[in-house]
Amino acid sequence: VAATLGGTAQTTYATGDLLYASATDTLAKRSIGTSGQVLTVSGGVPTWATAGGGVKSMTLLNTGGTALTGSNIITVSGISSKQALLVMIQGGSSTVASAEVYIRLNGDSTNGNYQYAGAYLDTNTPYIANAGSTNDQAFTVGTFSTNAGSTIRASALIWGTNSSSGLMPATITAMASQSSGSSANGRIYNGFYNASASISSVSVEVSSGNWDAGTLYVYGA
């Protein structure tokens, strides 16, 4: 029986078949998709496709990590099409005490593109609210202790890194301490990066001296 007369114009059905209008006054069958697929629209008709969605897992982009040594700037490049990046500094140390640690995206040092604020904690000053910057050239993620043997552990989670423009939210945590544990400071920041392109490289930098130990890990999703 024709579709325009109340029928379907179909004579057989397989398990999971769906009826849909493939054109005006015309019914057709869409076979069932595979496990995990969702029904979406392509070319004006329903079709099965692999489910999209948000971030499900992180993958280490620089296999084994990148050694923090021999230079004041260490860069992981070749990043593409990542919705989010997790940058981790493990056991980093500098040849100069009291050096600050920066994270830069795409090598960008444009003043004002990095904005962040939060809490700064120190053994000498237990709590300083709203430490940070609203007009900076990088994310300042930590400061080495004034004593020799200081190390830093830090992470920065940055979202929307596959966008070609707009704001990329960021959450930053860091702890720098003397090897004996007698001097320490920490930071907890929230902020954003004002992007002009999707992220293709991440750099970690010390403000003076060079990196002389530690490992940089960059995860992408």
Image: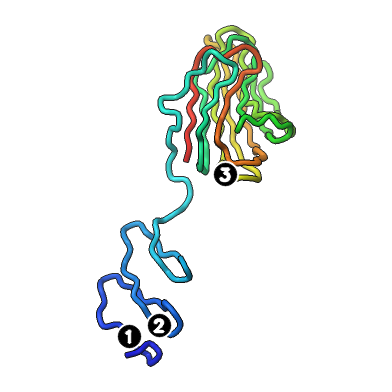
User: Residue 74 location in percent, x, y?
Assistant: 55, 22
Q: Which residue position holds label 1?
A: 9
Q: Name which of mark 2 and mark 3 comes first in the sequence.
A: 2
Do callouts 3 and 1 mark residues in contact (Cβ within 8 Å)? no
Residue 26 image-quadrant placement: bottom left
Q: Which amino acid does label 2 sit on?
A: Thr
Q: Residue at x 67, y 25 (%)?
A: 127
Q: Which of marks 2 and 3 is in front?
A: 2
Q: What residue type is labelled 1?
A: Ala
For residue 214, say whether it is visible: yes
Q: Which amino acid does label 3 sit on?
A: Gly
Residues under labels 2 and 1: Cα distance? 8 Å
Q: Which residue is drawn at 53% across and 17% down?
A: 92
Q: Residues within 10 Å of mark 1 (few under 14, many from 20)?
A: some
Do callouts 2 and 1 mark residues in contact (Cβ within 8 Å)? yes
Q: Which residue position holds label 2?
A: 26
For residue 129, say whether it is visible: no
Q: Nearer the viewer, residue 52 or 21?
A: 21
